[in-house]
């Protein structure tokens, strides 16, 4: 399935599978606030409150034991962000920026066979879940607003711009080499 396809948004079974898979990869993504497809008008400012009155950002409590793993909070991601280190609500872009970094640095253990495919259907599903979760979280981390369809389009536009830049740079290098060799 294609995560940027408009038809994907009408497919309840596919969306349920994506949501279940995302929850297997990062428990923060089990939150109703992270349900795919996400479609809201704007990201919540970390200095604001969510509709229940809870803060969008809970700062890191200063304590002398820096090696303590923070407790899990439903609907929040523990990460550095625009307001410092702490818990960012899933309605903020900061939550997805931090979660994307964490997912990329700590992928789930997936056993691969010599032909570069996951070695069994369970790890194959885990690999698919991981790929979907990383893609969706990345798209959200760069999106101008919390809308998964828009986020997919914006991610493609960024990729096209980077590809165009790389192509132009390689063409410039070729011209320089050609000029230097004549």
Image (spheres, grey):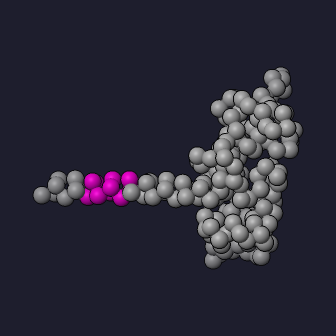
- Residue 35: x, y in percent? 77, 56
- Residue 85: x, y in percent? 72, 31
Prevailing SS of the magenta stretch: helix
Q: Is residue 167 magenta?
A: yes
Question: Is residue 95 found left or right of 30 in the rendered image?
Answer: left
Q: Quadrant of residue 120?
A: bottom right
Q: For the point 17% across and 53% down, which residue is it?
A: 180
Q: Is residue 54 magenta?
A: no
Q: Quadrant of residue 58?
A: top right
Question: Is residue 144 found left or right of 95 in the rendered image?
Answer: left
Q: Nearer the viewer, residue 147 or 141?
A: 147
Image quadrant where one finds the N terminus: bottom right
Image quadrant where one finds the C terminus: bottom left
Q: Quadrant of residue 172?
A: bottom left
Residue 104 visible from this viewpoint: no
Q: For the point 67% across and 42% down, which residue is it?
A: 43
Residue 30 visible from this viewpoint: yes
Q: Nearer the viewer, residue 81 or 120?
A: 81
- What segment carries the magenta color? 165-174
């Amino acid at each position: 399935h294609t995560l940027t396809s408009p038809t994907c948004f009408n497919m309840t079974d596919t969306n349920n599978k994506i949501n279940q898979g995302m929850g297997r990869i990062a428990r923060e993504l089990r939150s109703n606030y992270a349900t795919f497809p996400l479609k809201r008008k704007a990201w919540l400012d970390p200095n604001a409150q969510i509709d229940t009155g809870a803060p969008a950002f809970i700062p890191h409590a200063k304590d002398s034991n820096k090696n303590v793993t923070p407790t899990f909070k439903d609907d929040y991601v523990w990460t550095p962000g625009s307001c410092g280190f702490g818990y960012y609500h899933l309605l903020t872009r900061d939550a997805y920026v931090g979660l994307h970094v964490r997912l990329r640095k700590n992928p789930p253990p997936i056993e691969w066979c010599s032909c570069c495919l996951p070695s069994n259907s369970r790890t194959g599903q885990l690999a698919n879940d991981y790929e979907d979760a990383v893609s969706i979280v990345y798209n959200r981390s760069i999106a101008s607003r919390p809308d998964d369809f828009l986020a997919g389009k914006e991610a493609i536009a960024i990729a096209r711009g980077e590809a165009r830049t790389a192509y132009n740079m390689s063409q410039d290098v070729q011209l320089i080499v050609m000029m230097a060799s004549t």
